[in-house]
Image (tube, helix red, strand yellow):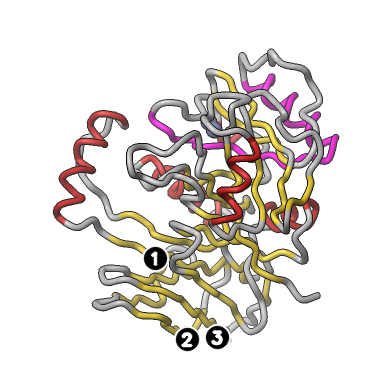
Amino acid sequence: MQRHWFKGDTHLHTLNSDGHLHQYELIERCKKLGLDYIIITDHNYDTVEKSYSSDGLLVIKGQEVTGDNGHVNIWGENVGFKPPYDLSNLDAYKKIAAKAKENGATISVNHPFCSNCGFLLDLDDMPMDCVEVWNTIQHSDNIKNLNWWVDKLNHGIKIGAVGGSDFHRDYAKLDMLARPTTVTLAKSNTPEDILAALREGRSVVTNRPDTSMIYLSVEGAQLGDTIKLNDNSFLVGDCRVTKLLPGHTLKIFNNNEVVYEHKAYFPEKEHNAVFEIRNKGYIRAQIDYDFTPALKKVYTEVEKRFLKGSGDVPTFFWAFTNPIWID
Ligand SMILES: [Zn+2]
Ligand SMILES: [Zn+2]
């Protein structure tokens, strides 16, 4: 069956928790950004009783189950308990996750390594379909999320990586909505198909709705698929990237090994990569970038003030794909 790309934001707040917009204002703004789907996830509250479509924008029911030990998004169906929730220990989180799963919901652990509200229990032991690798505009906690997820991939563990803007409101002139955007390869724009694609790891997470996109495939296999690699043979991968900016570096990984690298020195509308895959495991792509000196200065202050970081400015990712599995 033919799949299509749908742009979305998986993590949004409204006036029903600590957001600053009414549900309908938020929806209008998402339409203007050209999003295809959104999941509204207020803290411990179902703003959307039942998923619906508004002028082509799919609005999926969701809730951010929120406690001092961590935040977990429950998408598509009911949590199954009434707040206030018992979130005192890992078993309590597992109990909520199990009940929500029983109801048909999708579970995503949010911003697990956030300096301020990360997941404080044993993350390796927490059941999840997805993990929010990229939360809000880019910052160094997201690199910790990515490293944790990549370690899971290296162990053959399949968890769908997603992004969520965690939108509450804009800050000064900074537009925070759909940053990042999760672009998902789904059978159709319905709650069932979008959530299945998120769970199956068929998404690309990119900085904004209108920026770089990565189309990675291996001999017909697409993100989330598994393709067979015969012994003493190789597969040919194909990667088309749009809207590369100066300073962007495209990297393609076969497990932890970089099998293709390209740095853009001027804006490139499109870049095409062809490469060989010789190892079983997975293949994935990522675009990295460094801040300009002026932005570096600003960011150093942000790190120190809000993220308890050292102020060192790392290399960030601008976009990344979920893997194609090589068996
Ligand atoms: Zn949260
Ligand atoms: Zn949130």
Give the magenta-colored segment's residue range.
Answer: 90-115
- Taking 200 as reference, is 226 above or below it? below
Task: State which image quarter holds ligand 2.
Answer: top right
What's the residue type where badge 1 is placed? Ile
Q: Going from the N terminus, do you reach mark 1 or mark 3 first?
A: 3
What's the residue type where badge 3 is placed? Val
Q: CA distance from mark 2 to mark 3?
A: 7 Å
Q: Position of residue 297 (x, y in %)?
A: 15, 45
**Residues marked 2 and 3 touching at CB (< 8 Å):** yes
Kind of element beneath mark 1: strand
Q: Which of the 4 image quadrants contains residue 126?
A: top right
Near mark 1 (Cα within 10 A), the count class, few <14, some 14-19 or many ≥20, is many
What's the residue type where badge 2 is placed? Val
Judging by the rendered image, the residue that carries numbered circle 3 is: 236
- Taking 79 as reference, is 160 above or below it? below
Judging by the rendered image, the residue that carries numbered circle 1 is: 287
Near mark 2 (Cα within 10 A), the count class, few <14, some 14-19 or many ≥20, is few
- Taking 34 as reference, is 226 above or below it? below
Q: CA distance from mark 1 to mark 3?
A: 20 Å
Residue at point 68%, 45% (across, down): 129
Kind of element beneath mark 2: strand
